[in-house]
Image (cartoon, rainbow, N blue to C red):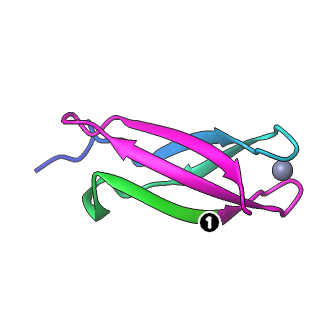
């Protein structure tokens, strides 16, 4: 059994400073995942929304935590 076709990391751009952040993702934790990840550059909290499609490719969006 190979997981090589599945996304296990992706990059989001910080909603505050715009810097790219590489993050680990788990396609098996749910088709849609929303959680807070602190930016690795400015340490401010980004609300990430991850959406996985049928082939486990991932779309990520970031927003400022309100
Ligand atoms: Zn940042």
Say whether residue 26 is left or right of residue 5: right
What's the magenta region? 37-66
Q: Quadrant of the C terminus?
A: bottom right
Vertical comparison of 48 with 6: above or below = below
Q: Position of residue 33 (x, y in %)?
A: 41, 58
Q: Name the residue located 88 percent from the left edge and 43 percent from the top edge.
A: 17
Q: Name the residue located 64 percent from the left edge and 46 percent from the top edge.
A: 62
Q: Position of residue 32 (x, y in %)?
A: 35, 53
Say whether residue 19 is left or right of residue 59: right
Mark 1 Cα shell of 10 Å, populated few (<14), some (14-19), many (≥20) = some
Q: Residue furthest front?
A: 66
Instruction: Tally the numbered discs.
Output: 1
Q: Decide whether residue 58 is among the magenta residues.
A: yes
Q: Decide whether residue 25 is among the magenta residues.
A: no
Q: Name the residue located 84 percent from the left edge and 47 percent from the top edge.
A: 16
Element marked by disc 1: strand
Q: Position of residue 56 (x, y in %)?
A: 27, 40
* Label 1 CB sits under 8 Å from any ligand 1 atom: no
Vertical comparison of 19 with 23: above or below = above
Vertical comparison of 47 with 19: above or below = below
Near-viewer residue (51 or 23): 51
Near-viewer residue (7 or 36): 36
Q: Position of residue 11 (x, y in %)?
A: 60, 40
Q: Residue furthest left?
A: 1
Q: Which residue is mark 1?
A: 36
């Amino acid at each position: 059994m190979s997981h090589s076709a599945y996304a296990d990391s992706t990059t989001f751009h910080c909603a505050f400073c715009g810097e790219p952040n590489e993050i680990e993702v788990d396609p098996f934790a749910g088709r849609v995942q929303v959680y807070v990840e602190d930016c690795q550059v400015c340490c401010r909290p980004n609300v990430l929304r991850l959406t996985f499609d049928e082939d486990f490719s991932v779309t990520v969006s970031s927003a400022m935590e309100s």
